[in-house]
Amino acid sequence: MTSQPGFSDLHDHSSNSTFSQQSVVFVLFVRCIIFILATYALYALYPRRYLLILILGFGKLFSDLIQKPKVLNQSIRNILLRLGVDVRSWDMTPESPGSFQRLSRMLKSLSLGRFGIADRKDVNEYLVSKYAAFQKPLWFIVSLEYISPHSIFTYNGQLHREKRRMIVRSLASKFYSKLVAVSWSKTQLLNSQLMRRLHATTTQSSVIELSSWTYRFITDVSGESLFDYDCGLLADGGEKSDLLHLHLSQTEGSSLLEFVCHRLLVTFLPFHWIYKLPIAEIKMQEFGKKCLFEFSRKVRTKRQLKRNEAGQVEDTDAMPDFLDTVFNGSQSSDEIDGHIITMITASSHTLTSTMTFALHYLASNLSVQRKLREEIYNYIPDPAIELTPNHLRSMTYLNAVFSEVLRLEPAARSIPRIAVRDADIGNMHVLAGEELLAPVRSIHRREDVWGEDAQEFRPERWIDDISGRGGATDKTSFMPFSHGPRSCVGREYAMNEGKIFLVGLVGAFELELVDGHRELRYTLPTPLNMLSYVRTIKGRLHLKLQPVEGKWAPSA
């Protein structure tokens, strides 16, 4: 049985002129619709320059049709794939079904299976057994390299494995003991600062914008635990930090019109052209790049001075800390900067998003919040007690709450890859150059795995006598940190820091939603600014805080 050709396999067939004409009509129709949408989008965003951009995109869009009118170019194929249309299932042959059947296939392809790898066995092949056949898409790599040319996220093959082992080795048990101690001390500072803000309000309102405070906490913990560097965001004057300004600039996200426009630009224009355009997201990314390199320079300079004074730290069984491991395993200062920038952005931006969602869900479900607070008090009756990793492992409901947040709002909502060679995933044949997605968020909400209440926030699903996995039958049912050889190296780091943040804040304050912020609205990520690629709550998170009484009562 031979596979039917997809759009890219169309050739001239003089004996079947009707089929050829239908193919050309369909291709032209799709491209004209895209061209019209692009015209409106560009005019709305750049009324003075949209014609120039449009002319550049026009040649790219229609050039191959002028030369070979029966070939659908790779750009449109990728657009349809990104929109969720499985173009390979459209059997464009003389024996193909009629237009009605083709329409039915298209509508079916827009369901969960539209990416072709929603089946858990297929996902396991995609991310584990055949992962070498797939790499991150070019647009993803180029966007990351624009921020930092040396990043583990952009490496492939043997180089990726070497750098991954280096980072995993640096995040050993000794590091996690330090992380827990630093995080626990920072919760006391965070609660103290929040109390000061509550006392300083001139009105009866006790509403605090918590998105920025979450970022300040996580960035300070990351700076001290990873780099032995005090970022100072929780201290007085921390609101003036460029890193905080960088975070606040990402919380509004892009509009739907901007999102569509940016996707079209990435599809049709080279990145070195795009980055010269006067687009707000690009300017924002440029500001972020400057802030991150300045931060990295300060961290690197401080550690280099320390190493020069004490003598170079050798890579021995004594297990150097993360930053010394990076120094020992890097070939240049640029590579060191790349690892520093990667870790500070991966830890602060992604975890801030996750914890912001966690606070919203807890404020929306007061019974869950009270139950979590009771467990905190049972294990830690006094915040003066030293928190240990054993506390975190023993707190069943805390782990259930954290897992449920990761299930509903994974930082990586999908895992994009491009095939570097032909490969078979399940019953699907993937051609080299085709882009695929593993829809993590959709998989996390499948009713056939999680039950009829899959869309609901219910931490109790994770507390069972059999597996404690909430109903997930395998690792591909729950993969907030991806899965396989390219899974997140900071999984344990993020989980420990996030849980300690919840313990400190929920133990000291009662959280309540306020009018105007009850609805959960998401930012739209854009490929033109990888610093805002992680979706979070749009417009920041405002909650009403009520300090608890007793030993856990926070002091200003």
Image: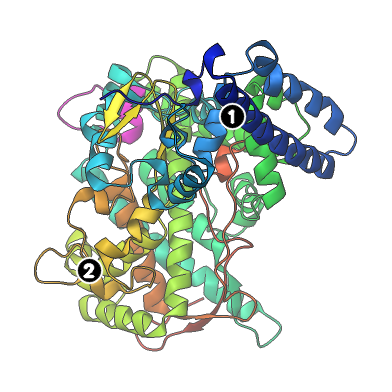
Quick check: is 281 in the magenta stretch? no
Magenta-drawn segment: 314-328
Badge 2 vs badge 1, beta-carbon distance below 8 Å: no
SS for callout 1: helix
Looking at this view, is 319 or 304 the one in front? 319
The residue under the point 41% across, 80% down is 365
Q: Is residue 83 left or right of residue 122?
A: right
Q: Residue 151's mark?
A: none
> Foreground: 192 or 281?
281
In the image, taking residue 249 as reference, residue 303 lies left or right, namely: left
Q: Residue at x 46, y 78 (%)?
A: 364
Please name the amino acid that badge 2 sits on.
Trp
> Mark 1 — residue?
76
Which circle's residue, 2 or 1, is located before the other in the chain?
1
Q: Residue furthest front?
A: 15
Distance (Cα) linking label 2 and label 1: 43 Å
Say the numbered circle drawn on residue 462.
Answer: 2
Where residue 489 appears, x then y in whole percent? 30, 39
User: Residue 410 lies in what quarter of the image?
Assistant: bottom left
The location of residue 325, given as percent across then percent down, is 30, 28
Which is in the foreground here, disc 2 or disc 1? Answer: 1
